Amino acid sequence: MEHNILKGLKSPGDVKKLNYEETLTLADEVRDTIISTVSKTGGHLASNLGAVELTIALHKVFDSPNDKIIWDVGHQVYTHKLLTGRYEDFGTLRTEGGISGFSRPNESEHDIVYSGHSSVSISTALGIAAANKVSGKKNYAVAVLGDGALTGGLIYEAINNAGRMKDARLIIVLNDNGMSISKNVGNLAKRLAAMRSRTGYYRLKAFAEKALSKIPLVGKPLANKFFKFKTKVKNAMYQSNFFEDFGVTYMGPIDGHNIGQLCNAFEGAKVINGPVLVHVNTIKGKGYSPAEVNPSAFHGVPPFDVEEGELPQSKNNFSEKFGEFLFNQAAKDKRICAITAAMSLGTGLKRFSDVYPDRFYDVGIAEEHAVPFALGLAKGNMVPVFVVYSTFLQRCYDQLMHDCALQNTKMIIAVDRAGIVGDDGETHNGIYDTAFFNGIPNITVYSPSYYTDLNNSFVNAIYHSEGPSVIRYPRGSEPYMPEGYTCSGKSFDVFGDEDAEIAIVTYGRIFSDAYKAYEKLKAEGQKVKVIKLNIIVPIPEEAVEALMDVKKIFFFEEGVRSGGVGESFGSVVLENNLKPEFILTAFPDCFVGQGKINSVLKKYNLDCDGMYNTIKETL
């Protein structure tokens, strides 16, 4: 397909110049570009396809960047990028040095904040609206969120505060496609479904308010009086709805694929004095039938064949393996329960949820709730296993401290995507959890390198640990395994020469590279030993004792330097009065950007060559 209109767009101002028919053609061109690009780079497909017309309408009606559009999570932002001057760079999506798959202010003035985590958009937009009021600006703050974000408690804190700011120029756009990543759960989804039947009433409301507002001099006062009158009529007909109980005017539902209706609704929302929620119905995956039929599978996708419409299948990765181990243990032990925060597919729990629905709990995007919920299960003599991405675990630090560690009750936190995740970049990398676990008492943290280690850690956490346990494992498949390697089940393993004066210490996925570096050094005649930590919190003191006669310790860590395992290990070395030179290689105090996992590790000297060179330079 030719992209004649899309190619000519340099800013949202160009979108405003298009007539209705041209916007329809633009929508087709945008969808074609998104499908073609994501099939090559991977990315979020179904969610972006569902938000095409919605985004076009937003840029037709609002004046970005003077009006601030805040995208919740950002996995609906591809059309926005294409309409704000990034068409030529769109082929670099999610590649190293290319444009991000999320909202990034360093890319464009139209990306107001960094995005990547859910349920924060209304809070941010409300803050912008408050700032506009103080400074006398008449611009709007627009929060665009999917209905899955409504499963996060922060949304309700924001709506509660928004309802108190009666004159805030805040417009909340709820993109309701009945999905988050997995299918939405809970009573709120049912409430939204019931609201969808009221389309005619709210279309009339938007049209009338828009028409009244255009009357010179008296238009806005008339619109306000009409608003108060229609509210009384609506309440008599329907009773108040959920959002208006918070003091937020509700409009909708609107057909999210009808640009004309969307523009009318947004214009109507601008007339209303105070916070407004515009409820938009869309189809996730719209315009690409495989994604429409299976939107969960096509939410986040690797490169795929567009014509075939089939995603490459791989069960050979840590997420699927952990799901398999969890399923197998649950078959033997009826106490085992699984908890996920709207990520049953990504964390390998689909089979568990199908076979053991009475022991499977999808709490929605509510990680903060998941941990005390697990505590309650544990108090009921169950063994809860909360499976969560490392980056999202950050959201419940307080609960990990108070409801997990302080209680010292058996529960298991399975930390998926630990370490570098690759193309999703700085908002999703799991390189910080080791640092915050280091400061929490009573927790045992396992960091397996291979599938056998993973299963062994899981069994130990269930049957040989009294308190809470954490098992952290990386994204992707099992790395290189040394010939003859077996899982010892100990807190650490030692490889190499007993009388070595050089030691490499590491854990997790990059043990594979450390062992390769050891083999290269050994081939050169160097006497080296490798310490592989299987438990990283607390530091196994016996592992430190194994370094009594070593003169140089090289610690390599796929995590942040400050507060990480390497610093803790170095501290224990000093406490034991050892005097070796201690060289720590880890990620500096920064946010690590997107790129292929191997490329990022290489950049920070955490691959085999980087480790080898680091050691050689100090010898």
Image: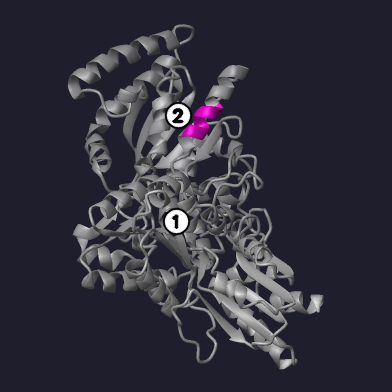
Please tell me which residue is depicted at 56% across the width and 33% down the height of the picture.
Answer: 68
Residue annotated with mark 1: 442
Q: Is residue 239 left or right of residue 119?
A: left
Which amino acid, by three-letter code, is at mark 1? Asn
- Which residue, as the protein is rendered here, is positioned at the far front? 577
Please tell me which residue is depicted at 59% across the width and 85% down the height of the picture.
Answer: 495
Residue annotated with mark 2: 171
Q: Nearer the viewer, mark 1 or mark 2?
A: 1
Q: Residue 397 in the image: state x and y as whole percent.
A: 47, 47
Q: Residue 198 in the image: state x and y as whole percent.
A: 24, 31
Question: Looking at the magenta stretch, what is its main secondary structure?
Answer: helix
Separation of residues labelled 1 and 2 (CA atoms): 45 Å
- Relative to the observer, which residue lies in front, 507 or 571? 571
Q: Residue 164 in the image: state x and y as whole percent.
A: 42, 20
- Relative to the observer, which residue lies in front, 6 or 170? 170
Q: Is residue 167 left or right of residue 495?
A: left
Q: Earlier in the sequence, mark 1 or mark 2?
A: 2
Which amino acid, by three-letter code, is at mark 2? Ile
Please tell me which residue is depicted at 63% across the width and 57% down the height of the picture.
Answer: 593
Q: Secondary structure at mark 2?
A: strand
Can residue 61 be seen? Answer: no
Can residue 552 be seen? Answer: yes
Q: Is residue 103 above or below residue 247?
A: below
Q: Are marks 1 and 2 in contact (CB under 8 Å)?
A: no
Query: Where on the picture, by quarter, is residue 297?
Result: bottom left
Quarter of the image where the C terminus is located = bottom right
Q: Residue 596 in the image: state x and y as whole percent.
A: 59, 68
Q: Is residue 613 left or right of residue 308?
A: right
Q: Is residue 128 left or right of residue 197?
A: right
Q: Is residue 151 above or below residue 393?
A: above
Magenta span of residues: 123-128
